[in-house]
Image (cartoon, grey):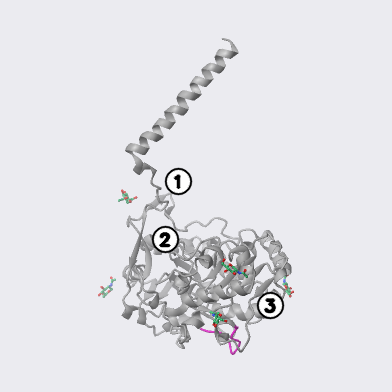
Amino acid sequence: MTSASLIILKLIFFFVTSNSSTSKLVTYDHHDHHQFNLKSPFDDVVRVLHEEQQSLSITADDGFGLSHDDGTDGGVSSPESGGDIEMVTANKSRHEVMHEDGQLSARGSTVNPLNAKEVYHEKDIFLEDYKQMNKSLRIYIYPHTKTDPFANIFLPDNRGSPGGNYASESYFKIALSMSHFVTQDPSKADLFFLPFSIASMRHDKRIGVGGIKTFIKDYIFNISHKYPFWNRTGGADHFYVACHSIGRTAMEKTPQVRINAIQAVCSSSYFLQGYSAHKDASIPQIWPRPGVRPTRHPSKRKVLAFYAGAMNSRVRESLVQTWSNDSEISVHQNRLNTPYSESLLGSKFCIHAKGFEVNTARIGDAIYYGCVPVVLADHYDLPFGDILNWNSFAVVVATQDIALLKRILKKIVESDEYTQLQKNVVQVQKHFQWHKVPVDFDTFYMVMYELWVRRSTVRIHSFN
Ligand SMILES: *[C@@H]1O[C@H](CO)[C@@H](O)[C@H](O)[C@H]1NC(C)=O
Ligand SMILES: *[C@@H]1O[C@H](CO)[C@@H](O)[C@H](O)[C@H]1NC(C)=O
Ligand SMILES: *[C@@H]1O[C@H](CO)[C@@H](O)[C@H](O)[C@H]1NC(C)=O
Ligand SMILES: *[C@@H]1O[C@H](CO)[C@@H](O)[C@H](O)[C@H]1NC(C)=O
Ligand SMILES: *[C@@H]1O[C@H](CO)[C@@H](O)[C@H](O)[C@H]1NC(C)=O
């Protein structure tokens, strides 16, 4: 065969194949156009919006009534946000998987944590980056004076120590203002801090829950007209910090903040409209406890697992229905006679079950008392998850596997994996603690690190 005829053959072949695929496309387009619908990557999952009763919300103390009696902030988890988005799985049956070695595991649950010993994904890289961050990260805070009519919203509240459910928000602002990261020179800044406090807006009668969205819209209008920084990046090098779940709707009138800025928030679910995993950062909800941290040896922790809290979600209802009469797992929906701290110290595992939101202060509580957290909150983008290996100090269980809880936990105790998990909890305690004057590797520094990895390295030059 001549090379010319080979080329002709190839051309014919190309024509036939390309034409057939084109015609297939055309056919689909005409007859099967539904095949071009995007398939949801979560097709076994449906989104259910259900209204929570206002009355439920009032008693929904998110469990804090148990220990957090001072109830600085009422401990009410966003009843005003008007409902709870809860994920339920369409197929409620349990997906048990029998491994080759005969071990039982549950789909989506952590039974055999990989790399269980190491608390960090990449310790050396983290420490190296952290040093770099600590040296070079610079933050510009939009300036406000004490005479600003909304000084209470913008300035750190340095009277006393922050407490309550939303303490993380206040602590961040105080710690940042005391830190070496702040620069007065915006040309040196990597990031710009929007210093409004959503928790304070809620309590300010001039704004209130209903006025937050408009206030933020006005604020962004003001800074984008007064300063050149916002317009340069459309807000991408700006961030704010919020712990109250109202934050998820607070940006509805300012899509640029929601889409471009970095939102460091406590309510960090992969399925919240207002939260974008990877762009935004999850921060832990911490109920601060002053004084000396109590400790207890694992062998003296007699209860297998502990949970207490209000019944404001299906996950919690299912947990209580399944385990309330168990002799080893202690779950309660009412106030306890035993002090909350004693329950956390006396248990091997402490259960965090999602309520209105994926987050509560319970994970922080468990870690504080050296109790291994059990996370029952599907699609919770866990705080510092890109730095910390949660499988090394917590047990993450899919909510559809609540019935397997005891088997999962007993296996961990019997295999003595528990000892390592508990030791690792003690190791991560420092990352789940705030200080007014920040201390290396505490929650403030961890949040700064999260911001650092999200900064843009492109510098935009301007001549004004
Ligand atoms: C639900 O899961 C079970 C167990 O994996 C399976 O046998 C069943 O077909 C599933 N049902 C649906 C509706 O997907
Ligand atoms: C971080 O910076 C502060 C202030 O300069 C310094 O005191 C601290 O030792 C630094 N930490 C590390 C780990 O580099
Ligand atoms: C925006 O600026 C106006 C005019 O200075 C001021 O009255 C208003 O309080 C500002 N609003 C916010 C939310 O900063
Ligand atoms: C930023 O952009 C807005 C909208 O385009 C514009 O009105 C405003 O004047 C700009 N701000 C500055 C400081 O140029
Ligand atoms: C627990 O036990 C009590 C008393 O036997 C019974 O009334 C109740 O229905 C049980 N609860 C569950 C969830 O099984």
Q: Is residue 140 left or right of residue 86?
A: right
Q: Answer with mark 1 or mark 2, whichever residue precedes in sequence.
A: 1
Amino acid residing under circle 1: Glu
Residue 362 to residue 149: above or below: above
Q: Answer with mark 1 or mark 3, whichever residue precedes in sequence.
A: 1
User: Which quadrant of the figure contains the N terminus?
Assistant: top right
Label 1 and label 2: CA atoms lie apart by 22 Å
Determine if the C-beta at disc 3 is less than 8 A from ligand 2: yes
Label 1 and label 3: CA atoms lie apart by 53 Å
Along the line of sight, the residue nearer the viewer: 37 or 221: 221
Percent coordinates x, y for residue 38 in the rendering: 40, 48
Amino acid residing under circle 3: Ser
Q: Nearer the viewer, mark 3 or mark 2?
A: 3
- Which of the 4 image quarters holds residue 227? bottom right
Percent coordinates x, y for residue 437 in the rendering: 66, 81
In magenta, the rendered stretch is: 155-163
- Which of the 4 image quarters holds residue 379? bottom left
Task: Provide the residue designation for mark 2.
Answer: 398
Percent coordinates x, y for residue 150 in the rendering: 55, 85
Badge number at residue 100: 1
